[in-house]
Image (cartoon, coloured by chain):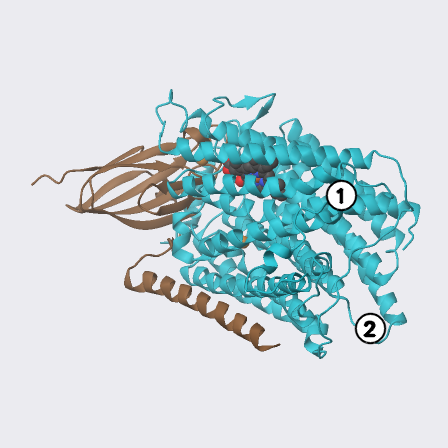
Amino acid sequence: MNISKSYKNTILIGLFMPMTLFILGAYNGVMQTLYRAGVIHKTAVAGINYYQGLTMHGVINAIVLTTFFAVVFGHVIMSHYLKKEPPGWSYSISMILMVGGTLIDAVLMIIGKAQALYTFYAPLKNSPLFYLGTSLLIVGSWVAFFGWIKMYSDWKKEHLNAKMPIAVLGTFVNFTMWFISSIPVAYESLILLMPWSAGWTNDINVPLTRMLFWMFGHPLVYFWLLPAYIAFYTILPKISGGKLYSGNAARLAFLLFLILSTPVGVHHQFSEPVMGQGTKLWVSILTYAVSIPSFMTAFTVGASLELAGRKRGARGLFDWMGKLPWFRSENYLFGYFLCGLLLFIFGGLSGIINASYSLNQMVHNTGWVPGHFHMTVAGPVLLVILGMSIYMYSTVSGKPVKFLSMVTIVPYVWMIGVAILSHGLMAGGLMGEPRRTNMGMSYTNPASDLFNPHWVPTATVTMVGGIVMGVAASIYLVCFFVTALGKRTRQPAISLPESEELHEEKTIPLLHNMKPWIIASVILIMITYIPSLINVFKYSSPVPNKFNAESPVNEGGNNDVHSQSMTNEKTK
Amino acid sequence: MNKYEIKTILLSSSVMAVFFFAILYNAFARKIDVPACIPYNATFRQSAIKKVDDTHYEVYIIARMWAFDPAEIIVPAGSTVDFYLTSADVVHGFNIERKGVNLMAIPGAVNKTTVNFTDYGTYRIVCHEYCGAGHHNMMAQVLVTYLKK
Ligand code: HEM
Ligand SMILES: [Cu+2]
Ligand SMILES: [Cu+2]
């Protein structure tokens, strides 16, 4: 499909800008492993302190890069399958809001006015503009979604009997879930935190802000993941030389994510007061249930790959794996997808451990947790982002990919790095190594009273993995920018590899209608969150606390004010 | 759906069901549970170590930037300790090594758990939630001593 100039530029900016910031994101990731291993015993290097760097790492990698990618990949999917462009207002306003919001956040993080990490837990405060910037980024992504809805309803009028393509369904499911779940975080950041941080209000109910954050926080991780799932279902079978094993199974998996993603946020809060044990057990069950669509995906994608291997001449039980197009530079996407999937086996299994109610006590907030999620978000999610970003940049700009053989080996190197990094973090975590901690200042510093020699070997393994990841990221970034700054040789176009389905399956109406699923999702959210909300007000009270990360002085009042407001609460 | 797909769904659901029964078994038969909810009031803002009887203690802990109060808790081996935890300022973490105790300290709320210290030794308590510039220095310990007859 040919594309207008402004649409093309929007897509290219949406790929280029987050990738530029990723330089900073990856740099800080590698630095963290050096601090944690006790190679660096400093609070800051090159003017960026550990926690400021960790804030950049989380915000850039996990929020900016992923959101931009979801939007740009969404644009390309919609245009490829519906052969249209979204309305001009939607893609331009969306990109302006997202770029504007990101720039605000980037500046604040660099000058150190935002260092409360990407979860911005109150009563640590950021500059009020940080909450605004993050909200602009999120709202910008909504605007793109609104444009696609318009685009799809126009298309539907022209194609009365056509089915919604699977990639379009996946995109719609993802953004519906995203829209529903970002309402609580928008409320948290714009209504509760921004006025409080600006000094217009004083009291804050901390458990309430945490509950609202995690109502968003878990769907957020699925918002990262679903674009990768879309790629696994609709692109991977094609590029591996096979067909999608079952289209209905793909649709069902997406729709199950729609109903189960939002109500499980409390599984990040097992260690907290305020949420009842009943609620916690209930979200454990729901989280187990949300593993089912992932098991289904593993089966369908695995079956599609086996099919591809057999088409390439495999006969036995396992030799289809060897027949797949590994290490082929004309098919570099395959490596990105498969390395991601391999990591995800372990990412998913460790996720089930995290979700297991009391077992979570063994791992919560230890190094285990970043060990787990680097095999998800820095595994399939990031590898699909990297592979598809360079692919889309090249097709949409008409510039050929440079250094193809380098681009081809990057995912394999990255996978090895993540495996080592995650092993170190998880092993350390099981021995109690805390996450989000500049361990080089204390626990891995022999000169400190707090030195703990048991944590040094695991933190060192983590560092080795981190350095390997850093090497892979650097190679990739060079290839990406050389490609982006190269010369155009082809006509700009939007096109994606498109998998066929193995069989023509019976149409199941329930799999083609999102409405009942949206209603079910809202009901499940109510069942989970109404009791939680009641608990918040029953078990906690607002506090006049407001702190800057640098100092233990309360900017929000003194202890006298505090105990006064507490006596009113004294009911028992 | 073909028979392989149905088998996959049944198999993965059964695996999850087995895991779930393991959770229930631990929660009800072995009493390994997540922390409990207690309504918050200002009395929890006073730190204290109370001896209820020879083997039962109640410890009221305040987490603040960047230390725990009390920073050292001494109990004899064989003690059962109820921990009540809150924060005076921002959110902190509370992780007792080798005991699987993992709590969040949240201002305006109080967290509670019960631990048996059967073996003597030193158990470090590490703050594992980012709480500002001094977070990496925030540690306390439980000293479990020989039980003297
Ligand atoms: C360049 C390679 C990378 C390295 C070496 C690396 C290393 C690390 C380490 C050691 C931590 C834990 C720090 C701590 O808790 O004290 C961490 C946290 C994190 N990483 Fe990475 N990482 C890398 C890439 C990524 C990527 C690609 C993503 C996502 C797309 C990502 C997302 C995160 C997130 C969300 C956190 C948690 C931040 C927080 O706790 O606030 N990382 N990373
Ligand atoms: Cu989650
Ligand atoms: Cu801390």
Camera sees residue A515: yes
Residue at the spot x=85%, y=70% of the render?
Answer: A156
> What residue sits right under mark 1 in the picture?
A390
The dot on residue A210 is: none
Ligand 2, image quadrant it occupies? bottom right
Measured as percent of width and height from the top left, residue A19 is found at 72, 38
**Would residue A460 be found to the left or right of residue A130 on screen?**
left
Chain under numbered label 2 = A
Of residue A5 and residue A138, the one placed in the foreground of this image is A5
Task: Locate residue B65, reporting x and y percent.
Answer: 44, 31
Q: Is residue A343 left or right of residue A423?
A: right
- Secondary structure of residue under mark 2: loop
**Tag in front: 2 or 1:** 1
- Please tell me in which quadrant of the rendered image residue A81 appears: bottom right
Judge by depth and name the residue closer to the eye, A464 or B24: A464
| Discs 2, 1: same chain | yes
Chain that is coloured cyan in the picture: A
Asked where in the image residue B2 lies, by quadrant, the reply is bottom right
Residue located at (54% from left, 31% from top)? A32
Q: Quadrant of the C terminus of chain A?
A: bottom left
Residue at disc 1, secondary structure: helix
**Colour of chain B in the image:** brown
Residue kind at label 1, given as amino acid type: Ile
Quadrant position of the N terminus of chain A in the picture: bottom right
Q: Which residue is mark 2?
A: A162
Q: Chain of mark 1?
A: A
For this rendering, which residue is in front, A453 or A399? Answer: A399
Quadrant in the rendering for residue B88: top left
